[in-house]
Amino acid sequence: MSETAVTPPMDVKRWWPAPMLPETDGRQFTLLFVLTVLCLLASLSVIGALAAGRAANGWQAQLVGSATVVVRATDKESADAAAARAAETLAGVKGVTEARALERDKAEALVKPFLGPDPLPADLPVPRLVAVELDKKTPAGAAALQAALKSAGVDATVDDHSLWTRQIMNAGALAGWVAGGLFATIVAAAAALIAFATRQGLATRNELVMVLHLAGATDAFIARQFQARFGRMAFFAGFWGGALAAAAGAALRLYAHGQTVAALLPVERTDLFAPLPCPFVAALIAAVTARLTAEGALRRMP
Amino acid sequence: MRYGREPEVLKDVGFSLPRGSFHFLMGASGSGKSTLLKLIYLAERASRGRVELFGRDVAQVKPKDRPFLRRRIGVIFQEFKLLDHLSAFDNAALALRVLGQKPTSYRQDVAELLSWVGLSHRMHAMPQALSGGEKQRLAIARAVIHRPDILLADEPTGNVDFAMSLRILRLFSELNRMGATVLIASHDEELVARSGKPVLHLENGRLTRYDGVSRPPAPPPAGATGEAGL
């Protein structure tokens, strides 16, 4: 280029500083891609945790709001009569909204998986069941139901589903912990990735860092450049990762309707908004990590 | 001053530059000129001896305070060290940007300075597109945009013809008239002779000529690296 080469005149009043770090290159695209995938996984884990929690709560609510009473025949009373009397007795207990004796064919249907499809002998003593609906706010306890039956002289066993409720609560809590652990692992992986990229950036831009230092830049000024670069990148990654996760959730709602997966993960429309904070959270994590990593590395420089 | 286990690059160097002075630092290649400048602009630390800047012993300056000392120094590197991803305008504005000033407050100053060094027509050219002389003038603009108290230049005329060297010399003289202390490392004897400015001469890491500077009261003990003060 000769000394006399001329470039078009510049409008100084419209000048604004260019980014201090060089613009993106291939490595940055790879980093953006990996961050987007991590944000997608993090958003999916949040949506999954919300849906799993909802499923567990739903099942638990169903179990807590009802009880089942197994009524056995006695020498003095047939099973049907005992079941009818048990239902009448239980309907009067405080905290019970409805008690209904199930017909013999329904009781037989429950044992069919164990005894086979053939008709059961008429004299087989199949216990009768009484389905009890409990008040949602002040449900009657198993002990109160058992006491009422005992005082009425009915030979019966009350199952308030507490065993299942406990297991579902445990499963729900476990799902929450797994989702939380997955989320934390993804966040840690993203932070490690940003820290690595920041150290790489400082190493490959050694001359830039030196020139800035000699121009009087503080470590904080240089670290801010990396903070801004990676924060901005993580924001975009969070946006796309969150959007993809929301799209996946919407697809699950749309195409898995009525299937087992929809019962296990009942994604609601509101869950699709859960990834909304993702860009901001990702940007914050990246910015803080880049800032701390850069400042630490710069402090160790001569 | 020594690098690792290598022999001492500078030894028994003691002088104090008066404020507002203009000196050439001369010597053959490998005599220690660049190392001496690096000690002054805080790119190296003396292995022994003492360097004072603005009345402060730089060894005692805390790392967090070093940037504030560096802001009072303008440096023109032998190989320019322009930032290739930034335009000439952005390069020239670097020191002001580092100071945290708003672009609206300094962009006119940058444009005027670039005009002053003859680069008004190359403001948004990238460094790769500039000639050696243009790069040199851009490096000068970047070094003086924040009006440093000390201007250090390492072989600033090494890549340009004699006419351009004289033009650059006039720029330095102008900056010196505006109050900056100027120290230029050069081995261009003709240019130095034409300037008529005092000379410090380095030979095998020792100062052998002290024009216009105060020398240390007594020779430093054997093996000491000496001292420099500004």
Image (tube, coloured by chain):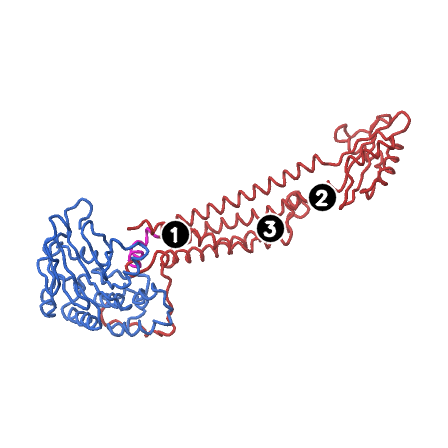
Chain colours: A red, B blue
Q: In this view, does B3 lie to the left or right of A67?
A: left
Vertical placement of A277 versus A54: above or below?
below
**Disc 2 from disc 3: Cα separation:** 24 Å
Give the quarter of the image for residue B138: bottom left
Front position among marks 2 and 3: 2
Query: Which disc is residue A27 wearing?
Result: 1
Counting from the top left corner in percent of width and height, residue A147 is at 82, 33
Q: Give the range drawn in magenta.
A: A202-212
- Residue closest to the far right: A76
Q: Do the residues marked 2 and 3 share a common chain?
A: yes
Q: Which amino acid does label 3 sit on?
A: Gly
Residue at image point 23% right, 52% down: B45
Q: What residue type is labelled 1?
A: Arg
Q: Are marks 2 and 3 in contact (CB under 8 Å)?
A: no
Q: Is residue A237 magenta?
A: no
Which structural element holds mark 1?
helix
- Decide whether the magenta segment is chiefly helix, strand or loop: helix
Residue at image point 89% right, 29% down: A78
What residue sits right under mark 3 in the picture?
A249
Counting from the top left corner in percent of width and height, residue B69 is at 28, 60
Give me the chain letter of mark 1.
A
What residue sits right under mark 2 in the picture?
A61
